[in-house]
């Protein structure tokens, strides 16, 4: 099923993000994770693509295929383009189609060093290209605090509008910890006439290493309330995990109660964390989805 159909049926879409095992990693671990995630009944699971991925990077397709064809959960394959040629992308799209995968999160990928080997400069180039196949639902990424390479948020949103106009069906946001940042972003996005469904990205932060990684990769703003938790519990792994989960639950309840169309949970392949979150939000999400069926006859 295409993700856009899920958005048509539901008021709130809940999805998980996982990543493929490292080259010498234990493959069984990811299957155990999927066994646990399946019980939580997500609307879909997305599978990340190695940074600057090349065609050799088929692990994403293998895993997205397992999610879809063996676990019977809708899957989204991430696909980056900065180092790819059109020929590479043709091969990948063929493989995705052969594996019955209908959904792609089309991304540029991070620019590292001299990235002049590919045929695509921006995600929008990839989106226009994939669109020609007419076989896929295409999601794009968006950045509530602005993409790190962009000088202003307004400029980033102008670029986002160009990207959406190339054929994006839905957007998934970068993680953020302050919902007001996301609400301000939505106001600007709607003013720019971007009207595709936007899922908010939420990452439960359960250890200190994760925080350092987030700072180095995307520079998300950490609100005082969040830092208080980290400072207080950073030396107690269980306390920090539980406080991090509680923070995400509170964030998600506020988001869905404010009418946000969906939440994409960055699980970091940790089913225990995903389970705790879903346990705490499932009645709320069901209530919203049920009410929308009653009011608008969605099914
Ligand atoms: P783009 O939309 O191309 O934007 C990149 C930059 O270029 C922005 O600053 C934008 O404002 C600017 N820009 C865009 N179009 C134009 C234009 N026409 N003219 C001038 N400037 C322009 N990375 C991975 O390697 N693997 C993954 O699996 C992965 N998954 C992700 C999932 C999500 C939900 C998110 C939010 C990010 C993910 N990333 C992943 C990271 C992503 O690849 C990087 O953030 C990358 O730097 C930008 O990708 P993009 O698709 O947003 O790029």
Image (cartoon, rainbow, N blue to C red):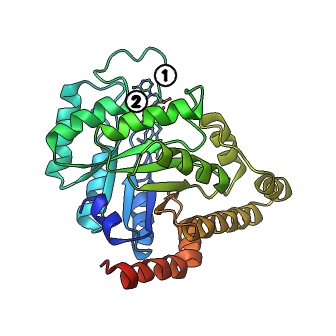
* Callout 1 secondary element: loop
- Residue at which label 1 appears: 112
Q: Is residue 268 visible?
A: no
- The reply, left or right, for residue 208 in relation to residue 166 is right
Estimate the spatial distance between the alpha carbons at disc 2 and disc 1, rounded to whole Å.
8 Å
- Residue at which label 2 appears: 52
* Callout 2 secondary element: loop
Q: Position of residue 292 (x, y in %)?
A: 41, 78
Q: Is residue 180 visible?
A: yes
Residue occupying image coordinates x 79% and y 57%:
225
Q: Position of residue 186 (x, y in %)?
A: 54, 50
Q: Note whether 197 is above or below 141 in the view shown.
A: below
Looking at the image, the residue that sits furthest to the right is 232
- The reply, left or right, for residue 238 in relation to residue 52 is right
- The reply, left or right, for residue 225 in relation to residue 164 is right
Q: Quadrant of the rendered structure where residue 160 is?
A: top left
What is the quadrant of the C terminus in the image?
bottom left
Q: Quadrant of the rendered structure where residue 152 is?
A: top right
Residue occupying image coordinates x 18% and y 56%:
100
Rendering quadrant holding ligand 1: top left
What is the quadrant of the N terminus in the image?
bottom left
Q: Note whether 224 is above or below 163 in the view shown.
A: below
Q: Are marks 2 and 1 in contact (CB under 8 Å)?
A: yes
- The reply, left or right, for residue 251 in relation to residue 274 is right
Q: Position of residue 79 (x, y in %)?
A: 33, 40
Q: Note whether 259 is above or below 197 in the view shown.
A: below
């Amino acid at each position: 099923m295409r993700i856009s159909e899920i958005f048509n049926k539901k008021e709130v879409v809940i999805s998980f993000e996982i990543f493929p095992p490292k080259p010498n990693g234990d493959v069984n671990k990811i299957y155990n994770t999927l066994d646990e995630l399946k019980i939580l009944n997500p609307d879909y699971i997305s599978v990340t693509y190695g940074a600057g991925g090349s065609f050799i990077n088929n692990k994403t397709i293998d895993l997205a295929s397992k999610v879809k064809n063996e676990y019977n959960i809708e899957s989204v394959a991430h696909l980056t383009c900065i180092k790819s040629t059109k020929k590479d992308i043709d091969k990948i799209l063929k493989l995705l189609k052969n594996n019955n995968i209908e959904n792609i999160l089309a991304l540029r990928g991070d620019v590292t060093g001299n990235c002049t080997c590919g045929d695509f400069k921006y995600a929008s180039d990839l989106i226009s290209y994939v669109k020609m196949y007419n076989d896929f639902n295409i999601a794009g990424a968006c950045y509530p605090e602005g993409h790190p390479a962009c000088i202003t948020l307004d400029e980033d949103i102008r670029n986002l509008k160009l990207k959406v106009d190339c054929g994006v069906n839905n957007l998934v946001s970068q993680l953020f910890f302050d919902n007001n940042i996301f609400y301000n972003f939505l106001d600007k996005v709607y003013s720019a006439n971007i009207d595709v469904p936007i899922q908010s990205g939420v990452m439960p932060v359960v250890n200190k290493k994760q925080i350092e990684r987030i700072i180095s990769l995307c520079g998300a703003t950490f609100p005082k309330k969040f830092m208080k938790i980290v400072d207080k519990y950073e030396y107690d792994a269980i306390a920090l995990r539980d406080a991090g989960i509680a923070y995400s639950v509170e964030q998600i309840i506020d988001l869905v109660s404010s009418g946000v169309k969906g939440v994409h949970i960055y699980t970091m392949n940790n089913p225990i964390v995903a389970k705790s979150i879903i346990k705490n939000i499932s009645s709320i999400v069901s209530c919203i989805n049920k009410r929308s069926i009653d009011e608008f006859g969605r099914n």
